[in-house]
Image: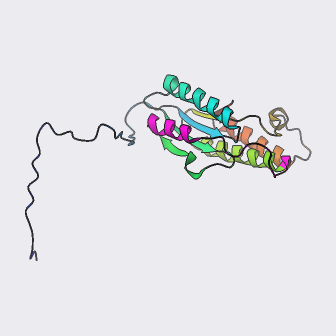
Amino acid sequence: EITTFAAVDIPITDSAPASSPDVVSDVQTNVGPPGRIYLFALAEMLPERALRARHFLRQFLERQFGPNDIAAVTLTGRGLANSGQGFTGNKRLILDALERFSGGFAGPSAEPRPFRARQLASSLRGLTEFLATMPGRKVLVFVGEHLEGIDPYAAKDYRGGALTPTERDAHAAIAAATRGNVTIYPL
């Protein structure tokens, strides 16, 4: 039973914008051809190198990111919680996430080098295995100063024996990339 109500008359004219021009839709549909899937994995680096990396990635996105492509930004090491971006087709959101990347906490580290190498290899393994489950063309763009103790040639050519945990993770990342049609570009 309705006991109280008030009529509200909102005048809507044809000249009123349907939505704010600053708001870009982030809604994806299954209509249209499939695009590429990019995952930008950013490692800790010095701030001046992070600035160069952001500039390069901004140019790449402006030139190569197509209307049906989607991308995400993630960190492989320490950094600010808001530095990442989930998968989206909105180029502005990806660019904003890249602009927030400051390089993390690069420089002398309290952690021993084998720990940092294992952490990086484990991150790359998880990211590659995740991308391998997605359909379509996938590209993992790893941006870092170096691969911190990971020898990709030793990891790809495993001939038995005992691998270190770092080598095991690197080998699993390369195997997942091969099985899942994931191209990895280290920059």
User: Residue 39 vs residue 155: left or right?
Assistant: left
User: Residue 68 vs residue 52: left or right?
Assistant: left
Q: Please provide the residue range marked out in magenta.
A: 89-114
The part of the image, by quadrant, that contains residue 40 is top right
Say which of 115 and 35 sits in front: 115
Q: Is residue 112 magenta?
A: yes
Say which of 46 and 14 sits in front: 46
The part of the image, by quadrant, that contains residue 157 is top right
Residue drawn at (72%, 41%) of the image: 173
Regarding residue 177, the answer to whether it shows in the image is yes
The part of the image, by quadrant, that contains residue 160 is top right
Residue drawn at (76%, 49%) of the image: 119
Across and down, in percent, residue 6 comes to: 8, 66
Across and down, in percent, residue 187 comes to: 69, 29
Q: Is residue 54 above or below residue 83?
A: above
User: Residue 92 vs residue 144: left or right?
Assistant: left
Regarding residue 135, the answer to whether it shows in the image is no
Across and down, in percent, residue 108 comes to: 80, 45
Q: Is residue 87 magenta?
A: no
Residue drawn at (55%, 49%) of the image: 82
- Residue lying farthest to the front in this orientation: 48
The mark total stands at: 0
User: Residue 82 vs residue 3: left or right?
Assistant: right
- Residue lying farthest to the right in this orientation: 161
Across and down, in percent, residue 136 comes to: 54, 35
Say which of 109 and 166 sits in front: 109
Say which of 93 and 65 sits in front: 93
Quarter that holds the N terminus = bottom left
Q: Is residue 110 above or below residue 94?
A: below
